[in-house]
Structure formats: structure tokens, C-alpha cells
Amino acid sequence: MKLVRTVHELRAWRTARTGSTIGFVPTMGYLHAGHLALVRRARAENDEVVVSIFVNPLQFGPHEDYERYPRDLARDLRLLEPEGVELVFAPPVEEMYPPGFATAVEVRGPLAERLEGAARPGHFRGVATVVTRLLNLVQPHRAYFGWKDAQQVLVVRRVVQDLALPVEIVAVPTVREADGLAMSSRNVYLSADERAAAAALPRALFAALARFQEGERDAEVLRQLVHAALAQTPVRLDYVSVSDRETFQELAQVDRPALLLVAAWVGTTRLIDNVPLDPVPA
Ligand code: PAF
């Protein structure tokens, strides 16, 4: 496994690869089992796998956790070593955004402006910009993203389609802890008590999903079920949404593929999660 820090080294490595298919897993590091699921999928579907590790300042708001976001490159490399990864690209900020860097990629409309886009202004501009630059640098055949960040998956797919980037975006199901909590690098922020309390979030989602599977199609009923399930817990909902899986419009009836999405605070940590709602056609 080779580690490169510069665009120059990455390009030299990529130029030497002509016949092989490349799978790419972009990450912000502090890897967990969810990232490793992306790497394994990339490994299974491509000749060579590239992982990037870069905590992207552009996608953090001024009062967010950019400075304290967990970073441990040595640990990440130890986790990746047995996974058959060919290349790790871990650039410093100046390498990704050299002096004079002035371009942004922005997706307009509800897809990027609702939910996470509303809660974190500028977030998806930062994500779209860094992902576009990374895709141009790595030039992968396929790039792998987790469904945990469902809105991010759809924003990236929009960018790839609109800018005609020659890459397939593969979305991989969320990996969960034994108690259902979605894997996230931010889970390390939780104290032991908060960590125990956080399991209420997936429990609420899965309770609503069970009602959906029993036939409930009224989106407001599903949203209220999540509110009710969390009412007596330390989990403070930021939003609960039933959104169209293509357009991200809020739905009144779940009559098409949708997502039940939540964002919530546990102490000072903001967590997001979602489950797919797949109405079976009658
Ligand atoms: O999902 C993430 O870790 C980040 O948003 C990504 C896709 C690596 C872009 O910085």
C-alpha cells in the first residue's frame, strides 16, 4: 500500500495505470467499519482501490467541529493495510486548495438546500467542490459512498450527472453498531451516557419503518412516531423528514421510493441517520 501526499505523486501513480479499473473511496479519515465496507465493496468490484483521507475545511461551517474532528493517519493506515488498498491519498490542505483556489461546485434546489443543506449552510458546496476535485484527480471508474449520508449521495450523483463526470457512484448500505447506532467518526464525541442514549435514534427510525412495513403510508404519522419515540429521551430532534429519494421534496404520502431521515443532538454531538422506505407497487 502506497501513501502519497501530493497531487503530483497521485497523478504520476494514476498515469501509470492504463488497463486497470479503479475504485475510489473518499473519506475524512478516522476510519470505522462503515468505511471498511466501502473499501471491501470497491475491492470486490475493481482491479485497484484508492482511498483518500482529507478533512475538508470547505464543508464545515464556522462554528462546526473542523478543528476537533478526529484525525489519526497512523491508525487509518493500519486499518487499510489488510484490505488490499493500492493507494492512500492524504494531502495537506494547501495541496487540495493551493493559493488562488477560487472555484466552487454548487447544486441548487431542494436536493442541496433542504435538511442538511438548511442546517449546515455551505456544507454541500464544500462536499461537491472537494468530491469533484478528488474525482478529477483520481479518475476512478467507480466511487463509493455510504447511504448514512443519503443527501450527500444524491448531491454527488447530481454533480456527476450534471458535469458529465465519467464515474459510477455506488452507494453502500449503512453499517450499524450492535445496538443499531449508525457508524460515524463523530460517535467518538459521545460520552458513555450519551452513547447509550444515542441508540434511541435508530430505535425510533426502525419503529417507524416497522409501521411503514405494516402498511402505513401517511408521512405525518411516520414523522410523529419518530417524535413520540424520542420524546422521553435525551435525544433532541433537529428534523425528521419523509423525503422523495430522487428530488428530496417532503412527501405527504409515501407513494414512491422515499427516505425517512433524522438529525438529532445528543449532548453537543449532532447525529444523522435514515432508513429507506420502499412502497411495493400494488
Ligand atoms: O462523507 C465524507 O466523509 C465526506 O463528506 C467526503 C465525501 C469524504 C467529502 O469530504
Image: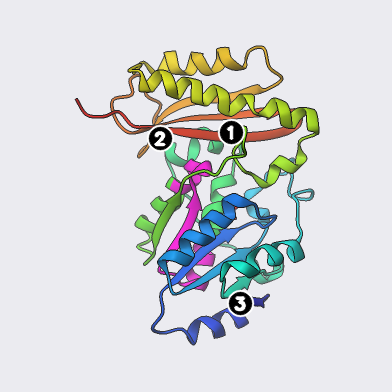
* Relative to 188, 184 lies left or right: left
Let me know if residue 136 is in the magenta part. yes
Residue placed at 70% from the left, 55% from the top? 30
- The residue at which mark 1 appears reads as 180
- The residue at which mark 3 appears reads as 7
Instruction: Read off the magenta span.
Output: 132-153
Asked where in the image residue 198 lies, by quadrant, the reply is top right
Q: Helix or strand or loop: what does disc 3 sit on? A: helix
Let me know if residue 84 is in the magenta part. no
Residue placed at 39% from the left, 51% from the top? 158
* Relative to 168, 262 lies left or right: right
Q: From this viewpoint, is residue 126 visible?
A: no
Q: CA distance from mark 3 to mark 1?
A: 39 Å
- Type of amino acid under label 2: Phe
Query: For mark 2, does the 10 Å Cα neighbourhood hold few (<14), some (14 to 19), or many (20 or more) residues?
Result: many
Say whether marks 2 and 3 touch (CB < 8 Å). Answer: no
Residue placed at 28% from the left, 25% from the top? 255
Q: Helix or strand or loop: what does disc 1 sit on? A: loop
On the image, the x and y values in percent for residue 89 come to: 62, 71
- Type of amino acid under label 3: Val
Q: Main secondary structure of the magenta part?
A: helix
Say whether marks 3 and 1 touch (CB < 8 Å). Answer: no
Asked where in the image residue 179 lies, by quadrant, the reply is top right
On the image, the x and y values in percent for residue 118 come to: 55, 34
Query: For mark 1, does the 10 Å Cα neighbourhood hold few (<14), some (14 to 19), or many (20 or more) residues?
Result: some
* Tag shown at residue 248: 2
* Relative to 75, 277 lies left or right: left
